[in-house]
Amino acid sequence: MINFNVPPFTGKEMEYMKQAVDEQKICGDGTFTRKCSKWIEEKTQTAKCLLTTSCTHALEMAALLADIQPGDEVIMPSYTFVSTADAFVLRGAKAVFVDIRPDTMNMDENLIEPAITDKTRAIAVVHYAGVSCEMDKIMDIAKRHGLLVVEDAAQGMMADYKGKALGTIGDFGCFSFHETKNYSMGEGGALLIKDKNCVEDAEIFREKGTDRSKFYRGEVDKYRWINYGSSYLPSDMNAAYLYAQLELADEINAIRLSRWDCYYQQLKSLEESGKAQLPAVPAGCVHNGHMFYIKTKDLDERTELIGFLKENGVMAVSHYVPLHSAPAGRKFGRFHGEDKYTTKESERLLRLPMFYTLTEEEVIYISSKVKEFYGV
């Protein structure tokens, strides 16, 4: 059986985790946490990176830094993971969902401005499959309306938009290092901060509301309770696991892109014959091979294809159920405008196996079975 996902592993993870243990500093902000943060800052050219226990927590910190209050509204796509909405709903805000573009599955930038009200405080963009939203237009809208932009770049590590790393374009960016992502620490994430003036508040929120980070730097002689906060620090052992992959980040990225390209070449006949659709990457966007998907005719065909692939030793899966159709989505949000594509496209999308150790031979086999299903 070819699994849908295999967590990345390079070989040095256990060695680095042992180093963290030997240093007797396995809690937050140890040697490897600092190494990972520095690596991400240098790679993305962001002002500050803070590792977190998850992308969910990075988003929660972004909501805190954005000072989201009860009654505020945050515009976002419905086609996303629940964490995008949870972060703002926890602050008492309402999620305002807008429709997606059928080509990229990203929020339609042309539908954002009509959804703005006097309660709108922020725009939460989601870069689906590591392909950027149309950030020039989104940032222009945000600037003209005085809104903050939070990038949910959970899938966007090593991807960029017109030369700018995803997660660094808006006010705050959030990465995921979950086991399903291109680079993993099991459970983990990172918050990227553009404005250095926000860093001190971010450190306080992340350190349970205290100024302990300043204490460790020798800037204060004792740390105190400064504000509300929580514990968003990952163990240094998790960071050690991640750092082994960051050292080989370019190699991992190149392999994933190679497998993505192989899928595309093998399956382009499906699109040419009108049997299925393949992913689109707009000009100016550089993706990271996070995901390869096809779009079937409809939900029934997708279900049949999933079963066919499973019978042939391939695990393929669907993805998000649109948030606005879920119980909590109806309770904490509303859909602005027409759901022209969100539900329809979500029911057609089928994700094929994609991971660091996936071989070209496996991609060719998977593709052959997909083509066999369609008689191509």
Image (cartoon, rainbow, N blue to C red):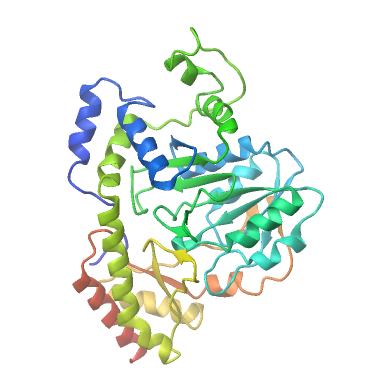
Q: Nearer the viewer, residue 183 or 335?
A: 183
Res 368 seen here: yes
Vertical order, 275 against 66 (above or below):
below
Residue 302 location, x and y as percent?
44, 77
Q: Nearer the viewer, residue 127 or 338?
A: 127
Residue 251 location, x and y as percent?
25, 56
Question: Residue 136: which quarter of the image?
Answer: bottom right
Residue 336 location, x and y as percent?
73, 63
Give the residue displayed 50% in from the left and 41% down from the top.
Answer: 192
Question: Residue 106: which quarter of the image?
Answer: bottom right
Quarter of the image where the N terminus is located = bottom left
In the image, farthest residue toward the right: 118
Res 188 seen here: no
Give the residue displayed 43% in from the left and 78% down from the top.
Answer: 278
Give the residue displayed 43% in from the left and 72% down from the top.
Answer: 350
Vertical order, 236 against 245 (above or below):
above
